[in-house]
Amino acid sequence: MQTPASPRGRLALACAVAATLSSAGAWAAQDYPNQPIRLIVPFAPGGGTDMIARVVGKKLGERLGQPVIVDNRPGASGIIGAEAVARSAPDGYTLLMATTAISSNGSLYNTISYDLKKDFAPVSQLANAPAVLVVNPGLPVSSLQELIRYARERPGQVNYASYGVGTAPHLVAELFQQSSGTKLYHVPYKGGGPAVLATLSGETRLLFPSLVPVMNHIRNGKLRALAVASDKRSPSLPEVPTFREAGMEFETGTWFGIVARGGTPAPIVARLHQEIVALLNDADVRKSISDEGAEVVPSPTPEAFGKLIQAEVERWAKVVRTAGIKIEK
């Protein structure tokens, strides 16, 4: 006779529990979704992240037969929205519109209440928006190499704007300095709008944003784009070289993706991944995302997206550590 206390009994009990949980997950996936899904966007309405979330959310809702409701929870570089998802039930009805910020915040902030690996289940990457180096036309440089020489001759004197300490343009600028051997002066602003305006006015000389907020200014000649940080030229700005073409190995930007609450049944994660990959092949969706200066990049599997996130965690941890950045939440 096998008792629960015996080795065989414990093994049998564990197998029974695993089988029960697996069956429950499969049953939940068959019934999923039977109510609206909430997609939390951890940034304010109107920005690139919000716009991509709304395009994807609308199409995802159509494919799943339930509305996907975008819920903006801005604050603390995306932490407030991420915490809301980390506190939700692991049932696939609360999703997070994740960005590069989720992979860098752990190195920047001392007090984050969630565990990135345990509390989130990667579903799929959606898109990637390469960073672009733009300068005020009053800066006497017309190429990347000219800028690097100019900055090296004036260490700490050439300033650049960011959307705030620890934001993507700040971290990209730090990575640029570490890669190019330059020393720039950081001027943090409260958001993208003020940072772009400061660079337009000449109050600051450089900015490392994604393409979206500066595209029209580049086309109108109000900002000069020196290089894009992607492996190939942007279709939106085909005349602007990549960093590699300009003589520097430098690829970075902002990625966008969707994650669920950790512990969400694997069949539900798989269903979400399947529908997201399918909708990203829709021509209208691809055009809408391209209009935001981003390129559609679906993950082949949820696991592949998880590996990307972890690689980004390690990459930005090194940048933050080298730069000595720390933020008190």
Image (cartoon, rainbow, N blue to C red):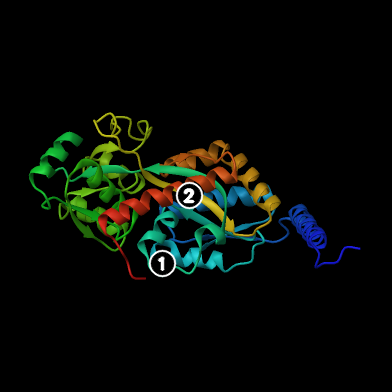
The kind of residue on which mark 1 rests is Gly
The span from disc 2 to disc 1 (Cα, nearest Å) is 21 Å
**Would you call the spot at circle 1 few (<14 residues within 10 Å), some (14-19), or many (20 or more)?**
few
Question: Looking at the rendering, which quadrant does residue 5 occupy?
Answer: bottom right
- Total numbered labels: 2
Residue in the image at 42% along x and 52% along y: 313
Q: Residue furthest right?
A: 1
Give percent across and percent down for residue 170. 28, 54
Q: In this figure, which residue is indicated by the disc labeled 2?
A: 309
Task: Give the vertical position of 187 relative to 125 (above or below).
Answer: below
Observer-nearest of 138 and 252: 252
Q: Compared to 68, does 151 lie above or below? A: above
Residue at screen point 38% across, 48% down: 315
Residue at left offset 39%, top offset 56%: 104
> Which quarter of the figure is the N terminus placed in?
bottom right
Using the image as rendered, state which of residue 34 and residue 216 is in the foreground. 34
Q: Earlier in the sequence, mark 2 or mark 1?
A: 1
Q: Secondary structure at mark 1?
A: loop
Q: Residues within 10 Å of mark 2 (few under 14, many from 20)?
A: many
> Measured from the top left, where is residue 327 in percent x and y?
32, 66
Mark 2 against mark 1, which lies toward the viewer? 2
Give the residue number, with chain letter if any, for mark 1. 75
What's the amino acid at mark 2? Ile
The local secondary structure at tag 2 comes to helix
Q: With respect to residue 94, does 219 lie above or below?
A: above
